[in-house]
Image (tube, grey):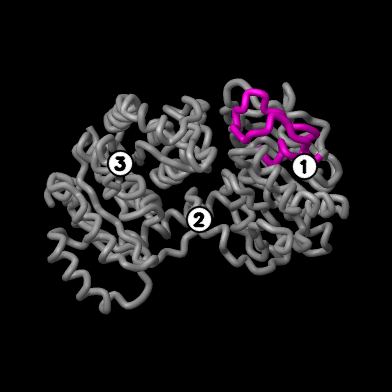
Amino acid sequence: MAKSIMIQGTMSNAGKSLLVAALCRIFRQDGYRVAPFKSQNMALNSFITETGGEMGRAQVVQAEAAGIAPDVRMNPILLKPTTDMGSQVIVSGRVEGNMTASEYYEKKMGFLPVVMDAYNSLAREYDIIVIEGAGSPAEINLKRDDFVNMGLARLVDAPVLLVGDIDRGGVFAQLYGTIALLDADERARIKGTVVNKFRGDRSILEPGLKTLEDICGVPVAGVVPYIHVDIDDEDSLTERFHRDAGKGLIDIAVIRLPYISNFTDFAPFERQDNVSLRYVDHVGQLGRPDMIILPGTKSTIADLVWLRESGLEAAVLQAADSGTLVFGICGGYQMMGRNISDPEQVESAGLQEIRGMGFFETDTVFCGEKVQTQRKGVFHAVSGILAGLNGLAYEGYEIHLGRSEEKVPALMSAGNVYGSYIHGIFDAPGVCEAILKALCHKKGIAFEALETTDPRAYKERQYDILADAVRDGLDMDFVYRVLNREA
């Protein structure tokens, strides 16, 4: 069975996911077969595996860092929020149903055998399992039925490194307070603390680190710098939404829907020099972009109501009329049809029917099982400004409940307006470049001025940069002693 090490955090967004990805890369570089594991994840960004299972995007990133294919066993439970009080529950890659928070916690322990089967199966195939906790282990109201933090560490006998976020302030209180709220057996599992996202002179930090070690009774395993690395994230606190992209030669605006999902779809554009990709949630921000993207959403009807009430629908329609390229993905594509209906209240949005934006002659009905599949093929019969896509291969995945037609093409087109159900459609070699070439031609700009990059080679470099920074920040000799139960 594999050796294990668990990364827990003092709070959400403390940097657990990236540290797990970094350790997966480091252990792989050191010659080990390594896999990530997170028993329960809550995120709207998800992925469909080759076998059609749905899992959280963070574990996909971690699997990529480890050099292995994503597998739903790495994330056996995924919660996708549908309202402030409820989520769609995905178990072993398949929809279990929509549940309120109280309903889920009543049924939660019934999913424990699924979690343990997934973990044990991975542990039989790999040398090392790097486990990610969720939120904080000091949520004392949730400890009784916990199998995501210390409860899981106990079940699989994993040592723990506790991570605090110094960038958000109060890191010493975070780490000490978390440890103080744990039971004695839980505190014994914490073998070291990690100060994450540090900027500045470490020598000024040293006296505090020594005091922290004294009062917590465990060593500081490292101080990890604030890493400027371009790796997909999935958290609702993502910095992407607040980043000032400036104005590039090509300007792309993504409508930031309230229930936006799979915003990592647009990373290929973000990674191009002289291309600005920005998130817009009110009319005053839209301006006159070269391309507008309507992204995926966990609640198509509710977000279409918001789009209409905010005035952004009218602005998008006006931009399309003036020739702006408009592209919808999944839920964004559904909004672009004639009509959307939800007779069984699958989305729980309160409306059974709503008029669409009218770009396409399609009607969407929410019913039945969720479509979960990978898709690949070659673009053909694409007209208009994006005709240059014809002949290029595409690949990606579909995750949606609504059905728009019996056979949906990879890309629908109507003049300068396009829509697709395929997440990741911009990732395949040449696709992003073809779209940018078309935008450059329309704007009278030389495509060479964008200095485009190979997205897959770029991503691999980012994982190596992350691993190098974390290897420098952590005491890796100590980490290996923890892993080998020598510390």
Q: State the residue position of label 2.
A: 238
Verify whether residue 337 appears in magenta. yes
- One can see residue 472 in this view: no
Name the residue located 71 percent from the left edge and 48 percent from the top edge.
307
Mark 3 or mark 2: whose residue is earlier in sequence: 3
* Marks 3,1: beta carbons within 8 A: no
Q: State the residue position of label 3.
A: 142
Q: Which amino acid does label 1 sit on?
A: Tyr
**Residue 219 coordinates in the image, percent (x, y):** 17, 61
Name the residue located 74 percent from the left edge and 47 percent from the top edge.
308
- One can see residue 344 in this view: yes
Question: Dividing the picture into quarters, in which one does residue 302 lie?
Answer: top right
Numbered range of the magenta stretch:
331-357
Q: Which amino acid does label 2 sit on?
A: Thr
Q: State the residue position of label 1.
A: 418
> Which one is closest to the eye, mark 3 or mark 1?
3
> Which one is closest to the eye, mark 3 or mark 2?
3
**Residue 114 coordinates in the image, percent (x, y):** 34, 26
Mark 1 or mark 2: whose residue is earlier in sequence: 2
Residue 1 as seen in the image, left or right of residue 418: left
